[in-house]
Image (spheres, rainbow, N blue to C red):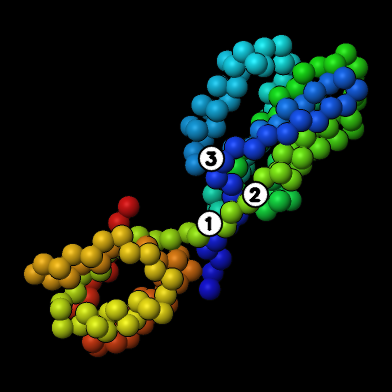
């Protein structure tokens, strides 16, 4: 079966890392879109608690099958903040996650290696306290069939990891279900090879 699950988080986690007077406040957020990322970053920059912070660095990864990643050093030397944060997201094998690290300068320059270590550590400590959750990628399908094959359809569906959204019993029977993405091709193959399911219609929906 093709990979159709991934690890993410479902709530916000935070941690703090200190080095030579500088404070690095890290926050891990579950996300579903780039627009959500923009809103979160805007909220932090407007928050009075972080007045005086010199950098709002971040990295995120979106999508399990074809992931999209982005990171920002927000004024720190190139490659010293966003990349180390993103590397920790990858190391913890997470997706649909944003990590923001807010730095308060303590008066002592950390140098390139010191900054890389600090942002890496800040992100790592935040993800260490986080509790990853396994999520399953599903495809939404609508089945329409006659009453005469209901028992056969039910028997077939027992073979798969299915979540039922709705069952309608009208002129025909309609099931709205969520099937694991990795099992969808097997389902289609079984249905197409059986003459009993010639009148079974399978349509995907949003």
Q: Give the image location of residue 63, x and y in percent.
A: 54, 49
Q: For residue 58, say whether it is visible.
A: no
Q: Give the image location of residue 51, x and y in percent.
A: 67, 12
Q: Secondary structure at mark 2?
A: loop
Q: Give the image location of residue 82, x and y in percent.
A: 72, 33
Q: Report the Cα–Cα distance between label 3 and label 2.
A: 15 Å
Tag 2 residue: 131
Q: Taking 9 as reference, is 15 left or right?
A: right
Q: Which mark is residue 205?
A: none
In the displayed structure, 133 sits above or below 96; it is below
Q: Residue at x 72, y 16 (%)?
A: 53
206 or 178, nearer to the observer: 178
Q: Residue furthest left?
A: 171
Q: Secondary structure at mark 1?
A: strand
Tag 3 residue: 31
Tag 1 residue: 135
Dot 2, how many residues are within 10 Å of its Cα: few (below 14), some (14-19), or many (20+)? few
Q: Does label 3 or label 2 sit earlier along the sequence? A: 3
Q: Does label 1 or label 3 sit earlier along the sequence? A: 3
Q: Residue at x 43, y 61 (%)?
A: 138
In the displayed structure, 144 sits above or below 49; it is below
Q: Taking 145 as reference, is 17 left or right?
A: right
Dot 3, how many residues are within 10 Å of its Cα: few (below 14), some (14-19), or many (20+)? many
16 or 194, nearer to the observer: 16
Dot 1, how many residues are within 10 Å of its Cα: few (below 14), some (14-19), or many (20+)? few
Which tag is nearer the camera, tag 3 or tag 2? 2
Q: Report the Cα–Cα distance between label 1 and label 3.
A: 13 Å
147 or 84, nearer to the observer: 147
Q: Residue at x 64, y 38 (%)?
A: 13
Q: How many marks?
A: 3
């Amino acid at each position: 079966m093709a990979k159709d699950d991934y690890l993410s988080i479902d709530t916000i986690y935070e941690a703090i890392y200190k080095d030579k007077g500088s404070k690095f406040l890290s926050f891990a957020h579950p996300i579903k879109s780039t627009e959500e990322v923009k809103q979160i970053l805007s909220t932090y920059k407007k928050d009075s608690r972080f007045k005086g912070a010199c950098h709002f660095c971040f990295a995120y990864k979106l999508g399990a099958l074809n992931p999209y990643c982005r990171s920002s050093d927000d004024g720190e030397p190139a490659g010293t903040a966003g990349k180390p944060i993103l590397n920790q997201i990858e190391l913890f094998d997470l997706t649909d996650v944003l990590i923001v690290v807010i730095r308060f300068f303590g008066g002592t320059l950390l140098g390139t290696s010191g900054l890389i270590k600090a942002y890496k550590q800040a992100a790592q400590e935040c993800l260490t306290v986080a509790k990853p959750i396994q999520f399953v990628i599903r495809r939404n399908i609508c089945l329409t069939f006659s009453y005469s094959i209901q028992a056969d359809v039910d028997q077939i569906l027992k073979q798969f990891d299915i979540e039922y959204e709705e069952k309608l019993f009208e002129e025909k029977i309609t099931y709205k279900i969520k099937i694991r993405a990795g099992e969808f091709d097997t389902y289609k193959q079984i249905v197409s090879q059986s003459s009993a399911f010639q009148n079974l219609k399978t349509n995907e929906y949003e």
